[in-house]
Amino acid sequence: MSAKDQHPNNAPGVPMVYPVWFENLQVKYLNPALKPIARYLPGAATIEHRGRKSGKPYKTIVSTFRKGNTLAIALGHGKTDWVKNVLAAGEADVHYTRKSIHLTNPRILPAGSDGTDLPWLARVQLRKMAVFVADIA
């Protein structure tokens, strides 16, 4: 078994597509460098959520896809802590350059499922990875 198969983010229906070394590089170096400017990058946003146990506020960089009142985020890193936090809370806030939106009814569409109501890029990614979907309040 590889390290990726035993990784805690690798859940049934929510496969971890990116290698472990890339996740470690992103968490340790890329995310801290990009966090101050993430809101200004095309397609990027920060999702604000609270820890399940600690209640501590967190901000995580994500790439979002929107269609109507639905927001989709591809889960290439599997079922990470921010996903678990948002699912447990049932809500979160996403911040872009000039606007913020509130998410409700979060759910995960497993890899390979039908995402006919999702944006085109999210449907393409749904073939190999799970997609986080929420309604915009």
Image: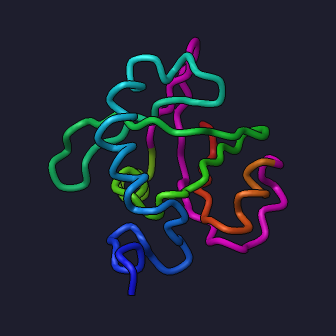
Q: Residue at x 25, y 54 (%)?
A: 52
- In the figure, is residue 102 to the left or right of 53? right
Image coloring type: rainbow
Q: Position of residue 46 (x, y in %)?
A: 46, 31
* Residue at the outermost left position: 54
Frontmost residue, 22 versus 126:
22
- In the figure, is residue 72 to the left or right of 38? right
- In the figure, is residue 95 to the left or right of 123? left
**First to last magenta residue range:** 92-120
- What is the total number of numbered labels drawn onto the structure image? 0
Task: Say if 37 sits above or below 72 in the image.
Answer: above
Q: Residue at x 32, y 35 (%)?
A: 29
Q: Residue at x 53, y 46 (%)?
A: 104
Q: Position of residue 124 (x, y in %)?
A: 78, 57
* Residue at the outermost top position: 98
Q: Position of residue 130 (x, y in %)?
A: 60, 65
Q: Position of residue 112 (x, y in %)?
A: 72, 74
- In the figure, is residue 24 to the left or right of 64? left
Q: Is residue 13 magenta?
A: no
Task: Say if 136 sits above or below 115 in the image.
Answer: above
Quick one: quadrant of the C terminus?
A: top right
Q: Is residue 114 magenta?
A: yes
Task: Say if 43 sits above or below 92 in the image.
Answer: above
Q: Residue at x 43, y 55 (%)?
A: 83
Frontmost residue, 74 versus 69:
74
* Residue at the outermost bottom position: 1
Quick one: quadrant of the N terminus?
A: bottom left
